[in-house]
Image (cartoon, grey):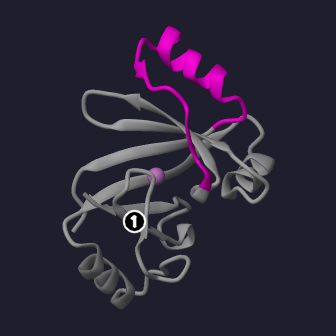
Amino acid sequence: MIGRLNHIAIAVPDLSAAAAKYRDTLGATVSAPLDLPSHGVTTIFVELPNTKIELLHPLGDKSPIQAFLDRNASGGIHHVCFEVDDIIAARDQLKADGARVLGSGNPETGAHGKPVLFLHPKDFFGTLIEIEQA
Ligand code: CO
């Protein structure tokens, strides 16, 4: 079902410091910050040859990233995103297998303008999984 690793998202307490670390220490290409108010995050994309890292920082009062940073003050891996060909078919198969889909259970438009769903981390060994119809 799952295909390519689309991205790994890392929540960071200081977005510009994290971008500088990836750019200057690790030598990666990093984007400018992008505010996504509907998702409650500001993101910077780190472009790698085979995937992306998304650096996430809370935006606004109700950001889903803030609680994560409250528990992980120095930051940490927030989720991994796998591509699927058909998100509805993937969702229905996952639900039939007992996986919990977060939120309404219907795909929402993700940070890249594509439909996404999130799967409960307790069903996947402590990792929040995003699936994206690429
Ligand atoms: Co993501």
Residue sitting at x 56%, y 61%: 126
Tell me where residue 19 sits by quadrant: top right
Q: x%, y% of residue 108?
A: 44, 70
Residue sitting at x 43%, y 81%: 106
Q: x%, y% of residue 32?
A: 50, 26
For the view shown, which residue lies furthest in the bottom direction?
Answer: 96
Instruction: Using the image as rendered, state which of residue 133 and residue 113 is in the foreground.
Output: 113
Residue sitting at x 39%, y 65%: 116
Q: x%, y% of residue 41?
A: 62, 48
* Label 1 CB-ligand 1 distance < 8 A: yes
Q: x%, y% of residue 37?
A: 61, 52
Highlighted range, magenta? 12-37
The amino acid sitting under disc 1 is Val
Compared with residue 74, is residue 93 higher up or lower down, i.e. above or below?
Answer: below
Q: Which residue is mark 1?
A: 116
| Apparent side of residue 69 relative to residue 27 in the rendered image (left or right) | right
